[in-house]
Image (cartoon, rainbow, N blue to C red):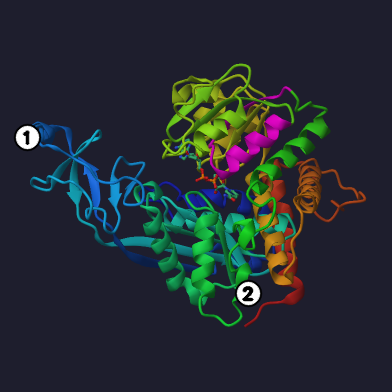
Amino acid sequence: MVGRNGDPSFYQESMDSFHRAAELIRMDPRVRMELEEPDFEHIFHVTIETADRLVPLPEEERPRFADLPPSTIEAGRTLEPLATGAYVLHHGALLSADLTVRQGVIHLAGKGLYKLEPGGPRQLKAYRVQHSEARGPYKGGIRYHPDATLDLCKSLAAEMTWKTAIVEVPFGGAQGAVRLDPFAYSREEIERISLRYVYKLKQMMGPFVDIPAPDVGTNAAVMAYMMRQYTDGERDHHALRGVVTGKDVRIGGSEGRTKAAGQGVVYCLEEWARERGFDLRGARVILQGFGSVGSAAADILEALGAKIVAVQDAHGTVYREGGLDIPALLGHAQNDPANLRRTVAGFTGGTAIPRDDFWSLDADICIPAALGEVIDANIAERLRVKLVAEAANNPTKPDGDRVLQARGIELIPDVICNAGAVTVSYYEWLQNQRLERWTEAEVNARLEQAIKKNYALIRDVAKNRARRTPLYDSRPYCVGKPIDVRTAAKVVALKRIEVQYLIEGFSQ
Ligand code: NAD
């Protein structure tokens, strides 16, 4: 499939290294065909009723309403501020209000002029792509983002298939999404969207069928709504808690899951540093993305003595030569009720710098932890780092990859770098099946071994270092010559998936 302008589609580009690895291992042609395209692509719609809103009046219309007397509406439970600048009017909001409305416009005391926008039904496009269940139930994130597409879900679903094989988790790969800006909806509307999504998908999910988890724009609260919708009214609902992972620990989530993706990134970095004789203490890091993954990675790295010199998110970039104070930045982004976009912008403990300057900062490690396709050839030329650790999925485009290799910048590929999340999701699922609770120390000890040993194995395959160690055996995976580390990771994944088909055979 090619994109509208004839360029390779996002999916096609993201399968580049799959095809390289499949050639190298002379993969069984039918297995390759099975994995080339997803098992199922579900495209559907989610409809919800939205509440009435107050939206800021466009600048040009304001003079006409300059004389409107101020109105007061009780803030808090009745009036919910959104990051878009609008307010959602909850049920009963106007009952105790002191209100003057003219042509649908009100002057909200102390805030300005707003237009009443009636709520009503909204239709949103939704996806769930189930790529492969050769090694276990489908598993993967659900993204709430305005740019989500089928192509993106296909690519992330396939990534998940490789990732679960690499960390030896008995799951397959899937990815879902709803096309929306989560910052433009109230908490209650997000709940309704999540419930409706699961209502539509219920027959196609389950703890042994397909297990969603959080991704960009979703979180533990969304997982709680989804679990409730799936288990509601089921006699054996306690046995079904493993239908989603990434839940709050108080309702069946796992200790260590919130930080797992970031923790996995740091275990990879420790292993990389150990092999190179590099000291992470004092290492300079630039980080893009300060959401679930980026903020956890920053927090753990700073505690190890690294300096996070710059953090960029969708709304700004903050920089401090001596390293940013990460707990303070976390407080600003996550705990300030006025910071509705949860952004690093406006942080007073650093300097705001232009977005574009971020990529050419002098550092040791660059961690992209936001969206995909950010490092193209141009950015790769400008990077002044030793290593790119891909905490995000698919952050490097194939042309960026070629430049990084040519410039000798090392890479920890996404399929191992951010695999901590799905690994601890598996631990959460196991705890749910067994009705157990593990401590954070137990979770992290297992995670550390799963990540470090498989990352070391991938590096051996990349360097064609065929050997048996107490933890792993790289001999069956080496292809007889050195290869790039991204392809090496896919070789490990594909060999593990292929063997499943070759021993078990195909159902007809
Ligand atoms: P999130 O929604 O919690 O945070 C996303 C962050 O990226 C935010 O800080 C946002 O401001 C930033 N961002 C968005 N657009 C940007 C842009 N154009 N420029 C710079 N920054 C931008 O998402 P997350 O869960 O932390 O996921 C981040 C990445 O990690 C994604 O690629 C995701 O697929 C991957 N991932 C997430 C998990 C998980 O468990 N949440 C697991 C594995 C991989």
Q: Residue at x 60, y 16 (%)?
A: 321
Q: Amino acid at mark 1?
A: Arg
Label 2: few (<14), some (14–19) or many (≥20) C-alpha neighbours in 10 Å? few
Q: Which residue is mark 2?
A: 238
Q: Which residue is mark 1?
A: 64
Q: Is residue 299 in the magenta section?
A: yes
Q: In this image, 107 relative to 32: left or right? A: left
Residue 24 in sight in this render = no
Magenta region: 282-303
Quadrant that contains the C terminus: bottom right
Q: In this image, 5 relative to 330: left or right? A: left
Of label 1 and label 2, which has the lower sequence position? Answer: 1
Residue 275 in percent (x, y) is at 82, 34
Residue 354 in percent (x, y) is at 44, 22
> Which label belongs to residue 300?
none
Q: In this image, 451 relative to 188: left or right? A: right
